[in-house]
Structures are given as C-alpha cells and as structure tokens.
Image (tube, rainbow, N blue to C red):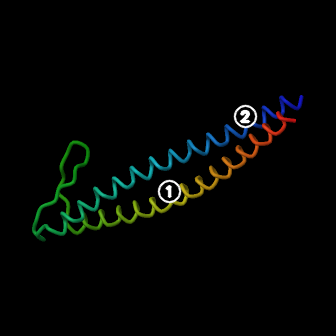
Amino acid sequence: MADAATQSAYEKLSEEFRKTQSDLSTYIEARQKLESQLQENKIVQKEFSILDDGSKIYKLIGPVLLPQDKDEAVMNVDKRLEFIESEIKRIENQINDTRAKSEKKRAELISFQAQLQERARS
C-alpha cells in the first residue's frame, strides 16, 4: 500500500512540475509575441515622426484603406505602445512567479527522489 501511495505522490509531483514548465513555456511565447508587437509599433512611431504634418495616413480596416488624421494615428500608436509595455511587465511577473514555482517543484522532486533512493537502499 505504501508503494502505491508513494508512486501516486511521485506522479502527482511530477505532473505539477510538468504543468509549471508548460505554463512557463506559454508565458514565454506570449512575451515573445508582445515583444514583436512592441518593435513593430516602435517602427510605426518612428515613421510617424518623420512624416510632415500634411502627410496622408491610411488605416487598413478589413480589406479597405481609410484615411486617418495624423494626430489620431499617433495617439493610437502611443496608446498601443503603453498597453503592450504594461502587458510585457505583467507577463514578466508571471514568468518570474512561474520560474520560482518551477524551481520549488524541482527541489521537491529531487528531494522526493533522494528519499526513494534512500528507502531502496534500506
């Protein structure tokens, strides 16, 4: 009975560790996507700073290009950059928390394995 309980506890611990690793991977992918969006929007912001005030700006909405006011376009890009930066910070916090949980689970798993080896020697 103890062996079945020990095996079950080990499997549960292993599954929790795998889940934290999976979560970490998901958060890292999300951060990479946000980082890509951030770079794209910074390029757009830089392009806007080069344009003359009288330049025409168009926004793609579905299959149609619609004219857009430069001030409105600049404001939209600035807001988008703020949002993306705040999302990156939020994801970074999640990554750090998940890394800490993962390291804790790894330590528990190593400790559990050491206990199993010690029992096997006895």
- Label 2: few (<14), some or many (≥20) within 10 Å? few
Q: What residue type is labelled 2?
A: Glu
Of all residues, the one furthest to the front in this rendering is: 121
Q: Please state which of residues 50 and 69 is positioned toward the viewer in this rendering.
A: 50
* Quadrant into which the N terminus falls: top right
Q: What residue did someone put label 1 on?
A: 91
Q: Residue 11 carries which label?
A: 2
Q: Assign a secondary structure to mark 1.
A: helix
Q: Which residue is drawn at 12% across and 61% down?
A: 56
Q: Assign a secondary structure to mark 2.
A: helix
Name the side, left or right, on which 52 lies relative to 91.
left
- Label 1: few (<14), some or many (≥20) within 10 Å? some
Name the side, left or right, on which 110 lies relative to 1.
left
Alpha-carbon span between mark 1 and mark 2: 29 Å
Q: Please state which of residues 92 and 63 is positioned toward the viewer in this rendering.
A: 92
Examine the image and state in which quarter residue 110 appears.
top right
Q: Residue 63 carries which label?
A: none
Residue 45 location in percent, x, y?
A: 24, 64
Say if 110 sits above or below 6 in the image. below
Name the side, left or right, on which 61 lies relative to 53.
right
* Quadrant into which the C terminus falls: top right
Residue 104 location in percent, x, y?
A: 68, 52
Q: Residue at x 14, y 68 (%)?
A: 50
Q: Which amino acid does label 1 sit on?
A: Ile
Q: Please state which of residues 34 and 101 is positioned toward the viewer in this rendering.
A: 101
User: Which of the two discs, 1 and 2, labels the residue nearer the N terminus?
Assistant: 2
Q: Residue at x 69, y 49 (%)?
A: 107
